[in-house]
Structure formats: structure tokens, C-alpha cells
């Protein structure tokens, strides 16, 4: 059975790179349906790519997940393919932490292979376009039913790079969270997921202080006046900050990884 394939990169839409990878996949697995997660990751931003994979893949069908944000292409980093504990999900990409957060979400790695010298890579293999010559053909082979073990050399799952992320913590009556992502609206996603909220004592309707700014913990933007700050659980069930018709990042002066100190009032 042909598997569906998701595809995420920092290639953008201006050049032909995404289209060429699509063509390679179609030539090997023409019946595989490809879902483009996004190709607009900021160039070389492995962290954002990893976070988007983690939060978005549960909404995509199980299958092969191809992700390429690869600032070390042609260097010593490995090209890898992985099987998650949820054995319906396979991952292909560079071994630079990009795949690690999503694989953790699906139970961790149970099988890993180095595909750098795979018999299924395209020849001649470019030193700078592994998306076309290694990752896309390997992902397509897996989608077409090729066994993971046949795609490369077995490696220890412990050798797969894990992206280190800040961790939210409680200090007395203060929750110390961190800005994980900031979207184009200035909404700030924090490193506190749904299952952790009760443990930190947050309840809908409460008023909190976020870095000295007062805000209600509410459901959606229009629950507050235009220009006002709110704390809410976003579409991916993570704690987040927003300003109705404005930017929480600008109001609080936040950048990625900055601390957000949340105190109940």
C-alpha cells in the first residue's frame, strides 16, 4: 500500500527546489499523496521547523514525513530515516534535531538508518541539494513500500540529534514559561501544553500578570477589548499570549526563548 507523504522545508516558493523534489517523488511513488506542510520556514531555522512538525503532524495522516531544513548540507551531519514507536510514521531528513520533537510526540525512535549512501539516492549526488538527491528519493521509496532497513545502514537511535528546548517551571506562585514561537500576528506560543495547565493552577476566567502586564486567561481574542492583552490556549492546545488586533510580542518586547513570568492575581 502506498503511504501518504508530508513535506516541510525552508526552500520557499520563489525557486524550483520544491517542484523538483515533488517531481522526484512522483517518479518513484506516483500514487503517494503529498501534503505540503510549509516551505516558508525562515532559512536555516531548524528550531522553528522542528516545532511546526511537532504541533502539526498529528493533523496529517500517518505515513512518511519528509522535512528539510539543512544548514550543514554536504558536511558531516548524517542523512537519516527513522521509524517512530507509532510504527505507522516514518521520518526522513537531516540529523540536526529537526525531526526529534515530532518523533518524541509519536513515542520516540524504534529504528534508525543512515541514508547518506543509500542505494536509492540519485546519482550523481550533489553536495548541496540533498533534498532532491537523497531525502526525496528515500522518502518516496518508503512511501512506495520499501522497507526502512533496505534504505540505509542501521544506526543506534541514541545517535539521533535531539533539539534542546527550554522547559517551563514553577517558582513559588510564578510560572516561568518561554516564548517558543511568534507568528505573523505577534501571537506568542509558550512552552506549556494543555496537560500541564492544571498542574500550574491556571483556570479560565482568572486574571494573571505576564511580565508585569495584566491579562485575563480566556478563550479567544474578542473576549477582550481591541488592543488588550489576553492569555489563552491556542489552536494546538498550548498556552499563548495575544493582543486583540495587535501584537503581544511587541507589547511585551518578546523574542524567541525570552522568559515570560506568569503570576496569578
Image (cartoon, grey):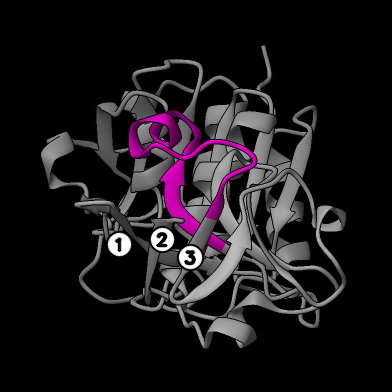
The mark closer to the camera, 3 or 1, is 3
Task: Give me the residue at 42% from left, 17% from top.
Answer: 86
Q: Which residue is mark 2?
A: 262
**263 left or right, relative to 206:** left
**180 left or right, relative to 245:** left
The residue most toward the top is 1
Do the residues bearing badges 1 and 2 touch, measured as CB atoms within 8 Å?
A: no
The residue most toward the front is 265
Q: Which residue is mark 3?
A: 209
Task: Give me the residue at 26% from left, 26% from top.
Answer: 111
Q: Which residue is mark 1?
A: 96
In x, y percent, where is residue 71? 40, 78
Q: Is residue 70 magenta?
A: no
Observer-nearest of 85 and 214: 214
Task: Give me the residue at 51% from left, 57% from top.
Answer: 208
Q: CA distance from mark 3 to mark 1?
A: 37 Å
The mark closer to the camera, 1 or 2, is 2
Q: Counting residues from the N terminus, which is met first, the one under dot 3 or under dot 2? A: 3
**27 left or right, relative to 245:** left
Observer-nearest of 202 and 240: 202
Q: Quadrant of residue 119?
A: top left
Q: Quadrant of residue 155?
A: top left
* Mark 1 crowdedness (10 Å alpha carbons): few <14, some 14-19, many ≥20: many
Q: Is residue 166 visible?
A: yes
Q: Quadrant of the N terminus?
A: top right
Residue 119's label in the rendered image is: none
Q: Counting residues from the N terminus, which is met first, the one under dot 1 or under dot 2? A: 1
Observer-nearest of 244 and 88: 244
Range of magenta residues: 189-207
Do the residues bearing badges 3 and 2 touch, measured as CB atoms within 8 Å?
A: yes
Amino acid at each position: 500500500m502506498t503511504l501518504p507523504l508530508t513535506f516541510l522545508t525552508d526552500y520557499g516558493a520563489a525557486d524550483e527546489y520544491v517542484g523538483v523534489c515533488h517531481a522526484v517523488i512522483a517518479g518513484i511513488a506516483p500514487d503517494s499523496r503529498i501534503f505540503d506542510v510549509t516551505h516558508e520556514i525562515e532559512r536555516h531555522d531548524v528550531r522553528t521547523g522542528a516545532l511546526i512538525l511537532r504541533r502539526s503532524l498529528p493533523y496529517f495522516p500517518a505515513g512518511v514525513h519528509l522535512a528539510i531544513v539543512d544548514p550543514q548540507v554536504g558536511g558531516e551531519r548524517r542523512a537519516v530515516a527513522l521509524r517512530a514507536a507509532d510504527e505507522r510514521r516514518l521520518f526522513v531528513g537531516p540529523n540536526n534535531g529537526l525531526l526529534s520533537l515530532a518523533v518524541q510526540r509519536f513515542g520516540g525512535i524504534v529504528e534508525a538508518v543512515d541514508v547518506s549512501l543509500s542505494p536509492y539516492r540519485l546519482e550523481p549526488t550533489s553536495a548541496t541539494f540533498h533534498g532532491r538527491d537523497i531525502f526525496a528519493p528515500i522518502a518516496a521509496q518508503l512511501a512506495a513500500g520499501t522497507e526502512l532497513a533496505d534504505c540505509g545502514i542501521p544506526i543506534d537511535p541514541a545517535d539521533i540529534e535531539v533539539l534542546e528546548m527550554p522547559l517551563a517551571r514553577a517558582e513559588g506562585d510564578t510560572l516561568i514559561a518561554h516564548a517558543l514561537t511568534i507568528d505573523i500576528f505577534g501571537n506568542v506560543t509558550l512552552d506549556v501544553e494543555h496537560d500541564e495547565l492544571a498542574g500550574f493552577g491556571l483556570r479560565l476566567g482568572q486574571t494573571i500578570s505576564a511580565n508585569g502586564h495584566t491579562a485575563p486567561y480566556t478563550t479567544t481574542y474578542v473576549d477582550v477589548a481591541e488592543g488588550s492583552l489576553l492569555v489563552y490556549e491556542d489552536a494546538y492546545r498550548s498556552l499563548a499570549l495575544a493582543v486583540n488586533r495587535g501584537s503581544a510580542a511587541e507589547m511585551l518586547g518578546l523574542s524567541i526563548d525570552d522568559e515570560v513570568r506568569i503570576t496569578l492575581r
